[in-house]
């Protein structure tokens, strides 16, 4: 049965009522997180070999055998299949027709709507088919707030805005950064912009911001090197587009201040959150080079880039590198 986004939390909270769980989509980190949550709720200890069987590669041929086996220590078992393929459908169908209380968890990132496995799961009432896609905007903001609230830590508006622009889209990377903030902050504390900057440090997102500022300022070589480091550190192409859009939006706002009669220095100083002092010179140079119309065209092109990067099989990193080169030419 296909599970709607608004019902995912309820389904995972009652995962014991299902025979199987199919987790698919583009966010491998979120897929793994939800698989762990489901397995833990049924079997408790994920390392218990008597209650949790993990199948990978050719081991998937043992799905039916493992799903019908009895637990030697009692309790419900979990069969956890990673990188599940369409070839599993016959085995899964036979298991579901039989009597077994084993929960089958299938991780299958990247399944298309035409996938036999996905089609079977969405039509079978005993299977919960859950799409796992990168969180954006308000959803990501809520995830951040909820995670930090467990440690009684909050973020200022400026800190949240900066963090949203710098986090990647993969759930595992997001969780890693939030763990840093949880360790950095103290219960009852509100973290400010500089706190978040200091905690996250020169991460992939920060390096990516340097690449964008350098390109807009016309420093092509510096931009290329920074973007290469960012991708090497695990930055995602989608995160790159968000950083570009954030910087372009701030440049557009500063440009409007200049048109209203302020000097460029005054326009930059009026921005909130303030421009990071190490980026201020490049930001000023970009403001001198770009027209308001050029910034708008660049933003439109960046939105198109984000859509292109979300297409399956797209050479997303190459597209980002080409886009960065184009940003190096002011319009």
Image (cartoon, rainbow, N blue to C red):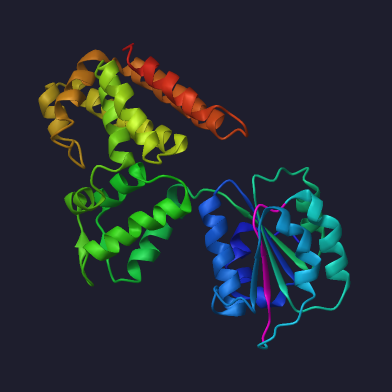
In this picture, is 202 found above or below 214?
below
Residue 274 pos. (x, y %):
17, 39
The verdict on residue 24 being magenta is no
Q: Quick one: quadrant of the C terminus?
A: top left
Q: Residue at x 22, y 27 (%)?
A: 254
Q: Quick one: quadrant of the N terminus?
A: bottom right
The answer to whether 184 appears left or right of 323 in the picture is left
Q: Residue at x 55, y 51 (%)?
A: 28
Residue 152 pos. (x, y %):
29, 71
Residue 175 pos. (x, y %):
40, 58
Residue 52 pos. (x, y %):
63, 73
Q: Is residue 32 visible from the viewing direction of this image?
A: yes
In this picture, is 150 found above or below 280?
below
In this picture, is 136 found above or below 257?
below
Q: Nearer the viewer, residue 100 or 61?
A: 61
Q: Nearer the viewer, residue 86 or 182?
A: 86
In this picture, is 140 found above or below 52?
above
The answer to which image quadrant residue 46 occupies is: bottom right
Q: Residue at x 31, y 18 (%)?
A: 292
């Amino acid at each position: 049965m296909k599970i709607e986004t608004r019902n995912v939390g309820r389904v995972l909270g009652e995962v014991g009522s299902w025979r199987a769980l199919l987790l698919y989509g583009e966010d491998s980190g979120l897929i793994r997180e939800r698989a762990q949550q489901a397995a833990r709720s049924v079997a408790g200890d994920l390392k218990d070999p008597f209650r949790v069987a993990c199948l990978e590669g050719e081991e998937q041929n043992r799905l039916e055998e493992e799903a019908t086996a009895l637990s030697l220590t009692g309790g419900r078992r979990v069969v956890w299949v990673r990188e599940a393929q369409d070839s599993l459908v016959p085995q899964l169908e036979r298991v579901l027709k039989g009597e077994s209380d084993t929960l089958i968890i299938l991780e299958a990132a990247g399944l298309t709507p035409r996938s036999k496995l996905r089609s079977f799961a969405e039509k079978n009432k005993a299977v919960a088919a859950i799409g796992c896609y990168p969180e954006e905007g308000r959803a990501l903001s809520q995830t951040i707030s909820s995670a930090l609230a467990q440690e009684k830590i909050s973020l200022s508006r400026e800190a949240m805005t900066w963090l949203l622009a710098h986090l990647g889209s993969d759930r595992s990377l997001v969780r890693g950064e939030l763990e840093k903030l949880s360790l950095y902050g103290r219960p009852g504390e509100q973290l400010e912009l500089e706190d978040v900057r200091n905690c996250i440090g020169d991460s992939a997102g920060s390096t990516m911001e340097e690449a964008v500022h350098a390109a807009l300022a016309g420093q092509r070589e510096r931009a290329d090197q920074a973007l290469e480091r960012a991708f090497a550190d695990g930055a995602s192409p989608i995160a790159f587009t968000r950083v570009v859009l954030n910087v372009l939006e701030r440049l557009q706002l500063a440009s409007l201040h200049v048109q209203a009669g302020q000097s460029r220095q005054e326009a930059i100083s009026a921005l909130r959150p303030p421009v990071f002092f190490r980026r201020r010179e490049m930001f000023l140079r970009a403001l001198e080079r770009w027209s308001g119309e050029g910034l708008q065209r660049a933003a439109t092109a960046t939105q198109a880039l984000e859509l292109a990067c979300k297409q399956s099989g797209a050479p997303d990193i190459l597209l980002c590198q080409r886009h960065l080169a184009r940003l190096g030419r002011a319009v």
